[in-house]
Amino acid sequence: MRWKATVLTLFPEMYPGPLGLSLAGKALAEGAWELETIDIRDFAQDKHRSVDDTPAGGGPGMVMRADIGAAAIDAARKNAPAGTATIYLSPRGTPLTQAGVEMLAHGPGVILLCGRFEGIDQRVLDAREIEEVSIGDYVLSGGDLAAHVVMDACVRLLPGVVGNAGTHDEESFASGLLEYPHYTRPREFEGHIIPEVLLSGDHEKIAQWRREQAEALTRTRRPDLWEKWNRR
Ligand code: ADE
């Protein structure tokens, strides 16, 4: 069965967007994965098709209604493969990691609930047992761009989407270290030459050099990852 993403959104015209291009787009066209978008507004019950209301307790902004969110989620779950995870994109969520992406990509697919406004009524997240996931410590104006990020990170791991089977092994985060730097022709660029060892043909030396570079980069740029790597 092919991996399926179902997106619940107020902006269905944002999809597939960038995921219709490049590797993900080619895989989508070839049927390697499937994308269904559901317009949350289709579940509104008034003639203005409103989905939000003022926050209980007062304060700024608007909150997505629980009844409308729940109806949209129930509709999505009906059409999704059994065992599909449901995620609400939110800066309050558990941080997305490569390990989390791998889990999602190995499953049957994902339902992604995208909010706007101040958020969604907490009761729908509790009643439908929805995980909250954040793509980083900054605030976007809504969940849609985060949903694209989650799908892109998953789709590139699906079998056959990224050509070379070994491609993922040495990427940043897969091993726990940031990836070593890459070079290609020309040999000299604005006075800078490719590190000699890479032109030596000595594969053992090259592997060692790349490993040292990966370690040095991780140590200086990401002390948090470096500490984890050394504790493994
Ligand atoms: N919605 C708004 N900001 C977000 C973030 N950082 N991650 C996921 N969803 C979001």
Image (cartoon, grey):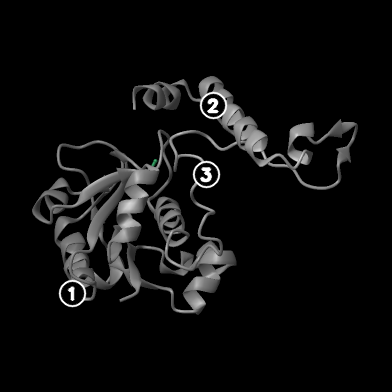
Q: Does the residue labelled 3 lie within 8 Å of ligand 1?
A: no
For this orientation, the residue located farthest to the left is 127
* Comparing labels 2 and 1, the label whose residue is closer to the camera: 2
Q: Is residue 125 above or below residue 15?
A: above
Q: CB of mark 2 within 8 Å of CB of mark 3? A: no
Secondary structure found at label 3: loop
Taking 27 as reference, is 128 left or right?
left
Residue 193 falls in which quadrant of the image?
top right
Residue at (28%, 66%) from the top-left corner? Answer: 108
Split into 4 quadrants, where in the image is the N terminus? bottom left
Are the residues flagged by discs 2 and 1 in contact, CB closer than 8 Å? no
Q: Name the residue under label 2.
A: 215
In the image, the residue with mark 1 has its CB under 8 Å from the nearest atom of ligand 1: no
Residue at the extreme bottom: 30
Residue type at mark 3 is Glu
User: Residue 97 falls in which quadrant of the image?
Assistant: top left
Tell me the tag on residue 78.
1
Vertical position of residue 194 compared to residue 110: above or below: above
Q: Residue at x 77, y 38 (%)?
A: 200
Whether residue 170 is visible, yes or no, is: yes
Pointer 3: what residue?
A: 170
